[in-house]
Image: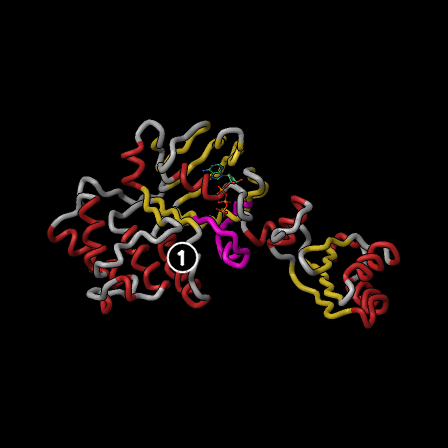
Amino acid sequence: MNANTAVISPTSSCVVENLSHSYGDKLAVESVSLSVKGGEVVAVLGKNGSGKTTLFRVLSTLVPVQQGKVLIDGINIASDPMAARRRLGIIFQSPSLDIKLTVLENMRCQGMLYGLRGTELNRRCDELMDQFSLTDRQNEICQTLSGGLKRRVELAKGLLHQPSVMMLDEPSTGLDPSARLALWDSLEPLASDGVAVMLTTHLMDEAAKASRVVLMDDGRKIADAAPAELQREVGDRVLTVVANDMDAAEHILRNDLGLPCQRVNKTLRINIDASGVEVSDLLSKVVRHIGENAHSITIGRASLEDVFVAKTGKAFVE
Ligand SMILES: Nc1ncnc2c1ncn2[C@@H]1O[C@H](COP(=O)(O)OP(=O)(O)OP(=O)(O)O)[C@@H](O)[C@H]1O
């Protein structure tokens, strides 16, 4: 093992304590604390402008810590950023490949930047290209690769120095649904190998696959738990109404039936468990009163969107 590479251990971790970051008067991240342990995939979920990228930029040592503390494997990034960087693998939102070089050339350049040489460099490149099914494509110029494949090369490249904490900023940006699935399929084994994986996203369905979700709003952390736990907190079941005339339907639900409902995007949602009404009674009441105006009435599990609405009183997409 090269002296510059990090060792993944059961203590692989990223710990953030009371981190705040401002741009002039604008407080972009406010007193955020969180932790990611080896074996976890933690999604930092928030709308545009909620502070995810700022948090990512501080954690990845791109901008200095203004207030609070960040420890990577116990190393304070403010006092020893170089040691922290050796333990960090980082995938930025904007592509970082040299598109004029081949897959293998990109890998080798990155490895050399981290001090890998000779047989060790060859071995790591081979291992990672094999792990990410890139071996057959190693001599292709990156410019000609699909978005999904380019992301895979970035991920492989980011792992060359065996980081114990992997951070990805909006990794699905620009990927089609199948490439997004493939990306997740490659993150889970990483976590199983003991890497602490943290990613930012504004996609609910993506965050729902993580072992834990850190929900951000307006620079603050508003929730931090496993997706299923968050969903249970707001009641497991939700009755969702989509109507042709949403104002009329909302009036009926609230005023005629006395049901607490929330308007989320183009739906009306009733937390079944909090309504105090048996699900079958609730359903027949709503069907009877909304009648012809209903486009759809469905019963399903609470989503992360319901969690966001319950915590903030705001819709996730505005
Ligand atoms: N360089 C900057 N100068 C001033 N304000 C900034 C700067 N970068 C971000 N902000 C502001 O800080 C807040 C948080 O932005 P940030 O980019 O961290 O959020 P985000 O959740 O990552 O959003 P997005 O997904 O749009 O990148 C926003 O109000 C944004 O306008």
Amino acid marked by disc 1: Glu
For residue 290, which quarter of the picture? bottom right
Taking the spot 53% from the left edge, 29% from the top edge, the residue there is 25
Taking the spot 36% from the left edge, 29% from the top edge, the residue there is 78
* Residue lying farthest to the left in this orientation: 118
Q: Position of residue 232 (x, y in %)?
A: 64, 52
Residue at the disc numbered 1? 188
Is residue 110 shown above or below 288?
above
Q: Nearer the viewer, residue 49 or 231?
A: 49
Beta carbon of the mark 1 residue lies under 8 A of ligand 1:
no
Q: Which colour assignment does the render follow?
A: secondary structure
Which element is circle 1 on? Answer: helix
Q: Position of residue 115 (x, y in %)?
A: 17, 43
Taking the spot 71% from the left edge, 67% from the top edge, the residue there is 298
Q: Position of residue 117 (x, y in %)?
A: 13, 48
Q: Nearer the viewer, residue 220 or 307?
A: 220
Taking the spot 50% from the left edge, 35% from the top edge, the residue there is 33
For residue 294, which quarter of the picture? bottom right
- Whether residue 190 sits left or right of residue 235 in the image: it is left
Magenta-highlighted residues: 199-215
Q: Magenta stretch: residue 132 in it?
A: no
Q: Position of residue 258 (x, y in %)?
A: 85, 54
Q: Magenta stretch: residue 213 in it?
A: yes
Please rate how many residues cluster around mark 1, counting C-alpha atoms within 10 Å: few if below 14, some from 14 to 19, many from 20: some
